[in-house]
Amino acid sequence: MPTSFKTLAELCEKLEATNKRLLMMSLVAEFLNSLEPEEVEPAVSMLLGRSFPKWSQQTLDVSWATLSKTIKNVTKADWKVFLEAFGETGDMGSATKILFESSKVDKQSTLFERKLTIVEARRGFEAIAGTVGSGSKEKKQRLIEALLGSASSLEAKYLAKIFIGEMRTGFYEGLMEQAVSKAFQIPLAIVEKASMTVGDVGEVAAIGKNEGKEGLLKIGFEVFRPVGLMLAQTASDVVEALKEHGGESAFEYKLDGARIQIHKRDDDVRIFSRRLTNVTASLPEIVQVVQKNVKAEEAILEGEVIAVDSKGYPVPFQYLMRRFKRVHAVQDMVEKVPVALYLFDILYLNGESLISFPYTRRRKILTENAEEIPLSKQLVTDEMKEAERFLEEAIDAGHEGLMVKKLDSEYTPGMRGKRWLKIKPVLEPLDLVIVAAEYGYGRRHEWLSNYYLAARDAETDEFLMVGKTFKGLTDAEIIIMTKRLKELTIKEEGRRVIVVPQVVVEILYNEIQKSPKYKCGMALRFARISRIREDKTPEEADTIQRVREIYEKQFLKKGTYKTS
Ligand code: AMP
């Protein structure tokens, strides 16, 4: 029997009500067990707040402006109720539920009232994602109305959460892997490995349900299905990096560009961004370079594209972003913003996964297959002085710093760890999320030009404010930002608007101070925006724990001054 969306929503309520991980995991395992095979992946995605599997190219693209308008239409309730509820709960899903409860529209009298199933909800999402082009806003609105129109207040709560991609039940991916392992009696290590390879635990769950352990053991890479990226942690200097890696490391230039994953089969080349979206159309010359040089029949490669001037020197990241935004007249941009590709890894070659090979071996295979495409400049050393010179050289050449890679390390998709470390020698910029904004004064009075910056609390998923800034963006950027933030506005408070935490910005600052002004107890001093991180999601932004680490390190440094 098809499972209703209501059952999923009720499960989410139970998850929200407890913080006992084991209990959460058992509840989900039991639920997974009860599902029909075709329901497993959609249900897993939804429980994690996703409308589609992670690697999918489909996105709902529903702005908060559209969603709130639809919610108003469907409920015909007083919007004040929503705002008050949001003020109390700080959660859009809960506020939506309270608004639905106060709705005057009588659901019982609807002639076609029927139960929404999990599969129907997914079909609804697919229809919404499929509307593009002119008039799509209205069409999307109608489709959302159709979904919400037949939803109970509890279902509406979780539909709204999935629409904005923020579940907040405290149930995260690692627990989902445990639940899959328990539900289908497959060893956790096998589930985790499959999840890393496929890049999506929902799909792993579906295979687990249908084919069991054997199915998961068979899983390999598939060309054209993007793989989760291996990510790096920060190291303060080369000494720390060398120590972490047991005395010897590979140091590579850290290029200030955009990470890409290149998939190739014969002459078909597709390129995926850091967020795993298909950006092939924006980078025609990279496609050509790969077609010309990479002779392997099938390969998955990784590298960084950087924008360069006529002499080949790197130019700031903003210029590069123009390439990705441009949908039309790509050719025009190809001439205006030339780019260069530097490869740094290879994950798959002619039917064979290379991710469990050590770094050094992958790098050798990469060298053999890249032909004339340059690799990131590299130095393998156990000498601190030599590594420091290499860092200076990278900075002098206009790059950001160094990436340091452990020589015997596997490639671990989707994981941030210490096997890759990044060293950026300046006070490390923070990627923060805009949670509110204020209209400026004088010339800027119609623009949202003063931004409230927050870091995510990794323990509670809450966004905590750490500073404010009106510096760093050009007028043109402020105008675009205003438009974007208006679309994301949840609530207006005089000249201030509270927005859905979605826009990530890179922030430079001089110091982190202790401050009673903010809940987290810290505030950034002289914060300024250095760039808009279109390539990062709010979940990927820096955490409050990271801010605290930098804060504490400042004192360590100050301490050494005193004693020396
Ligand atoms: P961050 O974006 O600050 O977390 O730094 C990690 C990013 O640095 C990666 O995702 C890549 O986009 C980029 N990067 C630049 N050069 C390299 C390199 N040689 N190896 C790996 N990543 C690099």
Image (cartoon, helix red, strand yellow):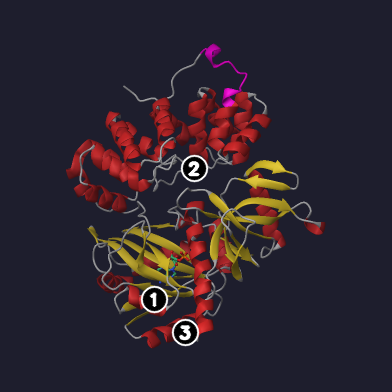
Q: Which residues are magenta?
A: 100-111
Q: Disc 1 vs disc 2: Cβ atoms closer than 8 Å?
A: no
The three-letter amino acid code for the residue at tag 3 is Glu
Query: Is tag 3's residue or tag 1's residue first in the polypeptide sequence?
Result: 1
Q: Residues within 10 Å of mark 1 (few under 14, many from 20)?
A: some
x, y (%) of residue 90?
58, 40
Furthest-left residue in this view: 214
Q: Nearer the viewer, residue 496 or 365?
A: 496
Q: Nearer the viewer, residue 358 or 13?
A: 13
Which residue is found at the position 65% from the left and 46% from the top? 498
Does 47 sit left or right of 528 as displayed? left
Does 487 sit left or right of 310 as displayed? right
Local secondary structure at mark 2: loop
Where is mark 2, residue-wise?
A: 166
Does 4 sit left or right of 527 as displayed? left
Q: Is residue 186 visible?
A: yes
The three-letter amino acid code for the residue at tag 2 is Glu
The three-letter amino acid code for the residue at tag 1 is Glu
Q: Nearer the viewer, residue 38 or 422?
A: 422
Distance from label 1 to label 2 (Cα)? 36 Å
Where is mark 3, residue-wise?
A: 393
Image quarter for residue 310?
bottom right
Viewer-nearest of discs 3 and 2: 2
Viewer-nearest of discs 3 and 1: 1
The quarter in which the N terminus is drawn is top left
Where is mark 1, residue-wise?
A: 240
564 over 253 or under it: above or below: below
